[in-house]
Image (cartoon, grey):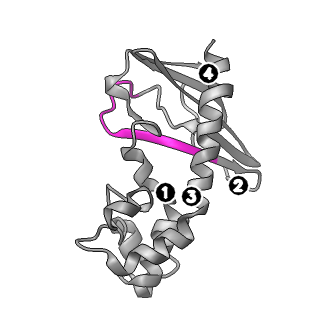
Amino acid sequence: MIYLWFILIDLPLALLRVLIALAGPIAVTLALPFARNSQLPRLFSWWDNPDYGIHGNSAYLTKEAYNPLLKYAGRWPSDWYWLVIRNPANGLTQSRLFSVSQVDCDYVKFKGKSIVDNYIPGWQFVYARKGWRFYTGFYYYVGNGEYRIAFKLIPGEPRRVRRVGMTFIVNPFKRWNQ
């Protein structure tokens, strides 16, 4: 049942999220001139960043490793890069269709390894339930790639209050050193 939900519901939603992100370059280009108080106009909220605004977080604003356009920090090219490339369609984390707060779920469970992340290889299928709705996510990380599809649930933090959104990462070229 849970795998069927992943295939029929959450995988198509993750693909829809990709399409929304692909519209980001145009949407953000149109919206940035009208941004106020570090936020895009409400009409463009899907492409906004509700946690850090249009300028980025402190690391993005101060460290070249996080921002290749650091000399433009807080201005158009850097803001555009933050919203379109670094955090595409991040505003979807506020949408009930594309995100969930784990603390509101009846449970958060997983199959595979409990922790899979940068420098921690393995696979993980995570699922949670909130009423009738399931939330699922798959994560596979090996030395030559990272694959993460659907909800970014964290099984080690079942009471996490911050909303987790969806993703669609297929990166066969990510490398890591042990």
| Label located before the other in sequence (4 or 2) | 4
Contact check, label 1 and label 4, Cβ < 8 Å: no
- Would you place residue 7 above or below residue 34 in this image? above
Contact check, label 3 and label 1, Cβ < 8 Å: yes
Callout 3 crowding tier (Cα within 10 Å): few <14, some 14–19, many ≥20:
many
| Label located before the other in sequence (4 or 3) | 4
Disc 4 target residue: 5
Indicate the quadrant where residue 52 lies: bottom left
Q: From mark 3 to mark 2, how far is it between C-alphas?
A: 21 Å
Amino acid on which disc 4 is placed: Trp
Disc 1 target residue: 89
| Label located before the other in sequence (1 or 4) | 4
Element carrying mark 2: loop
Disc 3 target residue: 21
Instruction: Please give left or right for residue 39 compared with residue 170 in the image.
Output: left
Q: Which of marks 2 and 1 is in front?
A: 1
Q: Residue 77 carries which label?
A: none
Segment tinted magenta in the rendering:
157-168
Residue 120 appearing in the image: no
Disc 2 target residue: 174
Amino acid on which disc 2 is placed: Lys
Residue 67 placement (x, y as % from top left):
48, 74
- Would you place residue 175 above or below residue 105 in this image? below
Callout 2 crowding tier (Cα within 10 Å): few <14, some 14–19, many ≥20:
some
Pick the residue in front: 82 or 16. 16
Is residue 73 a member of the stretch shown in magenta? no
Indicate the quadrant where residue 76 lies: bottom left
